[in-house]
Amino acid sequence: MDGVSTPSAAPPAPTPSVPFLKGHGTENDFVIIPDPENALDLPASTVARLCDRRAGIGGDGVLHVVRSAAHPEARAMADEAEWFMDYRNADGSIAEMCGNGVRVFARYLQYAGHTDAGDLAVATRGGVKRVHIDKAVPGADGTTARSAPGAITVSMGRAVLPAETVTVGVGARQWPTTHVSMGNPHAVAFVDDLDHAGNLHEEPTRTPSHVYPDGVNVEFVADRGERHVAMRVHERGSGETRSCGTGACAVAVAAARRDGLDPAVTGSPVSYTVDLPGGRLVITERPDGEVEMTGPAVIVAEGTIAPDLLVPTASPQTAGS
Ligand SMILES: N[C@@H](CCC[C@H](N)C(=O)O)C(=O)O
């Protein structure tokens, strides 16, 4: 070229590094992405890559932490709740609500210094949720472990029990279910033995198929004692997870009705202990219908997302749960 230089295009600006945290509530685990001003593009394919347990960070879902005022779906709630939980399932799909997610979200806000222990409100697609963060109880040495802080209670709203139900199937077995909505849909099957539910990574079959046009979370429940049950779950959009907070609420309400207990009739709250593969939740239904969920939530790691992971791909991957 005889020493003649041509102006070259400026190299593309590097994608800025994005911080993340990892947290879980009874081992329902989430990639937490603080993005106060809603500046990040998070299409379903990116969420699925982040949640992939082999090629990504790994999680049952993503908690995108955005100021309510900065998100079109939450602006109307901004006066009541400063922060919006933009929750996504592991396959990138959007869900109305995530019970364990709200507790982990609140723990993140506390961890990041946005709130103290006590009461706060969190905006979700299922409306504003009232949250109470217990003060951590000091250990014998007088310090409080970051990994074992106080429990978190969330007022989850009222359960709705539509009359129409489905039969679910896993392998050759089938069970009738109770339909419970906790803002998101649940089909609750009472079983003799949780092992009968077999492989719950695959979605259980549903008959008839038209009842849940947007899919459903399916819970399998076995009795453990008086007002004490154990459950497993296949989560819509995430596969089998080790816990589901809205699922535990749906299970407690379905078990109460099966046991002839309705706080609206008796005027007394009813509590169930719900054991999940990842831990224990206590669910209380109050006479006014409000369902409260109490359980742990911890932050376990923080780091930076490699820019490549945030570049949207043409075809969404399936989640590696
Ligand atoms: N794990 C969550 C529920 C997340 C949403 C669910 N998979 C859906 O699509 O409705 C919980 O703790 O409630």
Image (tube, rainbow, N blue to C red):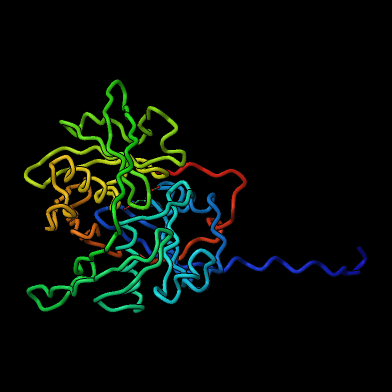
- Position of 181 relative to 13 (above/below): above
Quarter of the image with the N terminus in it: bottom right
Residue 115, given in percent of the width and then of the height, sits at 32, 78
Find residue 215 and report its horizontal and vertical position in percent. Answer: 43, 40
> Which corner quadrant of the image does residue 208 belong to?
top left
Label tally: 0
Front residue (pair 31, 219):
219
Question: What percent of the width, then of the height, locates residue 42?
Answer: 54, 58
> What residue is at 81 percent from the left and 67 percent from the top?
8
In the rendered view, would you say 215 is above or below 295?
above
Q: Residue furthest top?
A: 172
Could you tell me which residue is drawn at 62 percent across and 67 percent down? 14
Q: Residue at x 55, y 61 (%)?
A: 307
Q: Quadrant of residue 315?
A: top right
Residue lying furthest front: 265
* Residue at 40% across, 53% down: 61
Left or right, 47 with respect to 141, comes to: right
Left or right: residue 75 versus residue 28 is right
Q: Does 20 sit above or below residue 143?
A: above
The one nearer the camera, 74 or 149, is: 74
- Between 240 and 87, the residue placed more toward the observer is 87
Compare residues 279 and 145 and report the one nearer the observer.
279
- State the quadrant of the C terminus: top left
